[in-house]
Amino acid sequence: MGNLTVLLIDDSRADAALVREALKLYTLPVSLHVVPDGIAALNFLHQRAQFAQAPRPDLVLLDLNLPQRDGHSVLAEVRQTPALQGLPIIVFSSSSKAEDIERSYALGANWYMSKPLALEDFFQAVRTLVEQWASFQAGPHESPTLVRTDLSAFQRQNEK
């Protein structure tokens, strides 16, 4: 696999910096793009306004608590847009509330991971998300539903 393009949608500059640092340790080349709110995210994904030349991401990391339009709203719009429906979206949020997790999956998230508090755990989580998705993209697969189930099981196994 060549260069992986990742879009991080997160209003926390600190978390964005941590994701950037974690990806520096990743073995494959990653091009990270960061937008701070739901409106900018949708403009990036629809390639509108200042993002008219934005690349189509291979993977989206989406925070839920965003200004202007929250993550669930962004996820819902993306899944209702035919050209974006297949875009892999991982919710990477500080929330571990069951209702946020359930709603994210109901709206079409491919995976949900709560942001770890410890620095090394945060770095490992980012690397795991990207590595697992990159390895999935590189190999044959059957359906997004199976992927979500497999990745959820993988996350539970790593939490033990």
Image (tube, grey):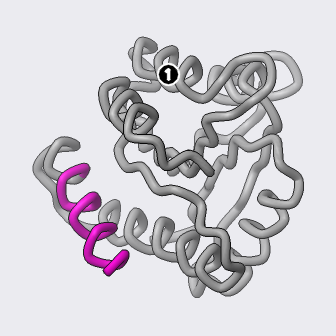
- Residue 157 belongs to magenta span: yes
Give above or below for 92 relative to 127.
above
Compared across the picture, whether 11 is left or right of 22 comes to right
Q: Based on the displayed image, in which of its 4 quarters is residue 55 positioned?
A: top right
| Figure quadrant of the N terminus | bottom left
Choose between 53 and 142: the one closer to the eye.
142
The residue to which callout 1 is attached is 78
The mark tally for this picture is 1
Task: Please say if 42 is above or below 153.
Answer: above
Q: Is residue 9 magenta?
A: no
| Rendering quarter of residue 64 | top right
Residue at the (40%, 32%) spot, across then down: 99
Q: Secondary structure at mark 1?
A: helix
Q: Position of residue 108 (x, y in %)?
A: 34, 30
Q: Position of residue 104 (x, y in %)?
A: 41, 32
Question: Residue 51 in the image: x percent, y percent?
Answer: 80, 28
Q: Nearer the viewer, residue 100 or 25?
A: 100
Foreground residue, 91 or 136? 91
Magenta highlight range? 148-160
Count neighbours of disc 1 (C-alpha within 10 A) and say few if under 14, some if 14 to 19, many if 20 or more.
many
Q: Which image quadrant: the C terminus?
A: bottom left
Q: Amino acid at mark 1?
A: Val
Residue pictured at 69% horizontal, 77% vertical: 22
Apparent side of residue 34 relative to residue 42 in the rendered image (left or right): right
Q: Is residue 3 above or below residue 110?
A: below
Relative to residue 26, is residue 105 drawn left or right? left
- At 68% across and 48% down in the image, what residue appears? 8
Q: Is residue 104 toward the left or the right of residue 17 in the image?
A: left
Residue displayed at 66% across by 23% down: 70
Q: Main secondary structure of the magenta part?
A: helix
